[in-house]
Image (cartoon, coloured by chain):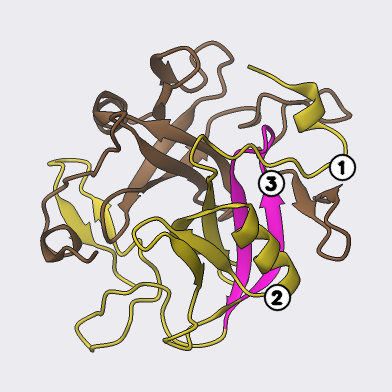
Chain colours: A brown, B yellow
Amino acid sequence: MSNINLETGNRLDIQFNKDGLAPAVVQETISGEILMFAWVNSEALETSIKSGFATFWSRSRQELWKKGETSGNMMKIQDILVDCDQDCIIYKVEKTAGGACHTKNEKNEYRHSCFYRKVNLENGKLVYVEK
Amino acid sequence: MSNINLETGNRLDIQFNKDGLAPAVVQETISGEILMFAWVNSEALETSIKSGFATFWSRSRQELWKKGETSGNMMKIQDILVDCDQDCIIYKVEKTAGGACHTKNEKNEYRHSCFYRKVNLENGKLVYVEK
């Protein structure tokens, strides 16, 4: 299970899955809040590094997805963290405008984070997270 | 792409993938730090809710994985967040002891987080994150 070459040293060697993808968690640096979860392929990761803006692979559209390219709600890459076995990354970002989520709140604004609900641990129902 | 029934309302309806799994991000509540990334099936999620301790599905061992059951480094569930399209969850946790990662640092201690390296955005190499 454990792979010393992946866990140590300085070689970036992301273990993309059989579809060529790896999970990417997006975290707002200043608040620590997790904004969204998406997928990257090697091109998306490379584009994020080179352009400085969070880029993903859209599984539904099967194309490179430069977050905020149409909405203007881009995310500036501040750091890219990699886990021990190099099969997951974190984009630490600063949002340039608007919300990270494609859904809107009751004020008709894009939600800051996709994680706007939590499980009520007593009854298993979802409740909205108060901000 | 968008599914109003998943995005609104209070019904927990996790969209497990074709292997019956969904990604789970583990975040330490007090620090906001992301500790690890793993997978859950419906049994693991249910066990986390009922037991109050973070539980996953081990893809390598193909079994329920109660984190810390052998090491003692368990994680108390404080909240479970769900994203808009209900295909990713966050376990917000309090660690009861030790590190979240199976790798050890230079002091021979289990690392606090699996995300102990970041990409040097200039040259694409990995560097250790200073704590």
Q: Image point 65% across, 27% down: which residue? A: A98
Answer whether residue B131 is magenta in the image.
Answer: no
User: Closer to the N terminus: mark 3 or mark 1?
Assistant: 1
Q: Secondary structure at mark 3?
A: strand
> Which is closer to the viewer, label 2 or label 3?
2
User: Closer to the N terminus: mark 2 or mark 3?
Assistant: 2
Count of numbered labels shown in the rendering: 3
Closer to the camera, A14 or B17?
A: B17
Q: In the image, what residue type sits under mark 2?
A: Ser
> Which is closer to the viewer, label 1 or label 2?
2
Q: Position of residue B65 (x, y in %)?
A: 49, 69
Residue under circle 3? B82
Q: Image point 89% across, 29% down: which residue? A: A106
Residue B101: quadrant of the picture: bottom left
Tell me the CA gap for discs 2 and 3: 19 Å
Q: Which chain does the numbered disc 1 sit on?
A: B
Q: In the image, what residue type sits under mark 1?
A: Asn
> Magenta segment, which residues?
B76-95
Q: Is residue A100 left or right of residue A67?
A: right
Q: Position of residue A83 (x, y in %)?
A: 32, 57
Q: Position of residue B85 (x, y in %)?
A: 67, 32
Q: Image point 24% across, 64% down: which residue? A: A1
Q: Position of residue A94 (x, y in %)?
A: 49, 40
Dominant secondary structure, magenta: strand
Residue B35 appears in the picture as rendered: no
Residue under circle 1? B10
Q: Which chain does the numbered disc 3 sit on?
A: B
Residue under circle 2? B51
